[in-house]
Each structure stands twice: as structure tokens, then as C-alpha cells.
Amino acid sequence: MLKQILSQYSGEVQKTWRKFYELIPVVTILVQIKIFVFFGASVTMASYLNNPVAGLLYALVVFLVLLILSQISYIQNFTDKLFEKNLHIIIKVVEPTSRLVAVFNRYEEEDTIRLKSKEELLDFVQYLPLDIINKTQKRGLLAILGAQEKTVKDIMTPKKQVISVAPSAILGPVLLSDLQSSGHLYFPVSSKKGQPEGLLRLSDLSDINNAKQHHKASDLMSSYLAWVSEDFSILNLAQVFSEEKQHMLFVKDFEDNFVGIITITDIVNNIFGISKE
């Protein structure tokens, strides 16, 4: 509501609303005190005119009537305009009280949670109740907070698990069926020693007529390979994918040896905490 209000005003009026927002904890306390005092005064007066039990009942009836009246749109609009018109007066009354409340440490600062490290933040999120954040949201938030420390090595598919195609593999329905069943869209074309020589796209193989014109994987593969170091931060990978215009990057260690692959899907899954399983 404050954002909507501030978008309508500028200058001194906007400053006045911001000042009121800062005083909301004190205003809340004063409202609670006012309700208690008025209720106590109502019970006392009604009890003086009747007996204590009747006085309590009369006071409850009065408060119930006031509560019902406060829900009427006309009265709400009137009180909103009256409140806005006298907002500067309210602030002048509340400000001295805020200093007194601050001295006795009686409002919101007491309940404010002050985290001193990222580890405490992660632990705090981990134990948030499910009525505040569900399991999927919690997993995604923890993944985003932990992404800064992760590198390519942490989320890549290791070389031993990479499904590759030999350069001499014959293209055709059999190979297409095997690759489709893997669930992947891109496949490294690697030599017997496991060194990548190119990249084969499943979309190229899905065109049977095109595949028949190329007898081997090496004839249809793309020879351009985009590389990234295994110690590269995953937060910066999006820029690399964009610059290289590739969906798969080949990963190398500090000795320039091929150690695995990483795809855009790997990044998305890890940033949003989606398990590969």
C-alpha cells in the first residue's frame, strides 16, 4: 500500500508518508494502548451505571457495533481522507513517543532477526516452516544462495558419464533410436581416446533424408567446440553460453584435458534446485 501511495505523491507529501512508515511500530503500540484504555473506560462507566457484569456486556456490544460500522465503505473512505488530512499532526504526536519507546526497547527491534553470516542465513532458510515457504521454494532458494560458491566442476557431467558418438559411427535409424532413448539433444563426437572432435545434434539426425546423405557421424557433426574451465563460476556461465551461441560447453581442467560437459539445462536445474533424478 505504501508503494502505491508513494507513486501518487512527490516532494513533502511523499516525505511525510515515508516518515509515517518509519513510525508504524510505535503507532501500533499506541493503537493497542488506546483500545485497552477506551475499553477499560467503557467497562468502568457502564459498571458505574449498572452492575459489573452488565457493564462488561454493554462495553462489548459497543465495541462490536463500532467494529461493524468500521467495515462500511462510506465510513472507511471518510476516515481515510480524515487520516490523510491530519497525517502531519499524527506524526508530531507520535514522534516524541517513539523516542520514549526506543529508550525502553519495547518495539520491533527486539524481534528483529539479525543474521551475521551466510551460513546462518542458509540455516535459517533451511528451517523455515512449510506454512511460510514450501519444499520446492525452499530448495530453489537454497540453491540460488549456494550458487555463488559452485563451479562448473560441481554440476558438470563427468567424462565417464558422457554419452558420445564415434566419428566413424554409421548414421541411420539404429543410431537415431539409441540416441533418442538417451533423452539428450546434443552428443560429443569423440575418438577412441575420448578426445572430443565435434558436436552432433539430434535435430540433424532426425531428418532421415539428410542423415542418409552422410554415412558417418564425422560428416554431419559440427567441428566447432566451445570450452570452459572446470573452476569457472556457474553464475558467469550464462554469459558464456550467450557469447558462444551454444547449448553445450566442453569442460577442461588446468592441464587442458577434457573432463566433462555442461549444458544450459544443468545450470537451470542447479539454480532452481531441480534434482537430476
Image (cartoon, helix red, strand yellow):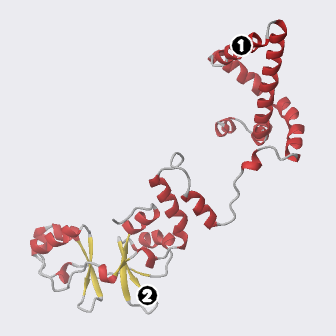
Across and down, in percent, residue 81 comes to 73, 23
Q: Please say if 245 is above or below 100.
A: below
| Foreground pick, 106 / 160 | 106
On the picture, is 13 further left or further right than 187?
right
Q: Which residue is mark 2?
A: 253
Q: Quadrant of residue 186?
A: bottom left
Which residue: 36% across, 78% down?
Answer: 261
| Foreground pick, 181 / 124 | 124
Q: Is residue 16 visible?
A: yes
Across and down, in percent, residue 202 comes to 22, 70
Across and down, in percent, residue 237 comes to 46, 72
Point out which mark residue 2 bears.
Answer: none
Which residue: 60% across, 58% down?
Answer: 124
Residue type at the position of mark 1: Leu
Density class for disc 1 (Cα within 10 Å; few <14, some 14-19, many ≥20) is some
The answer to whether the residues at label 1 and label 2 have Cβ atoms under 8 Å apart is: no
- The quadrant the N terminus occupies is top right
Q: Which residue is mark 1?
A: 57
Which residue: 66% across, 38% down?
Answer: 7
Residue type at the position of mark 2: Asp
Which residue: 29% across, 86% down?
Answer: 196
Tag in front: 1 or 2: 1
Across and down, in percent, residue 14 comes to 75, 38
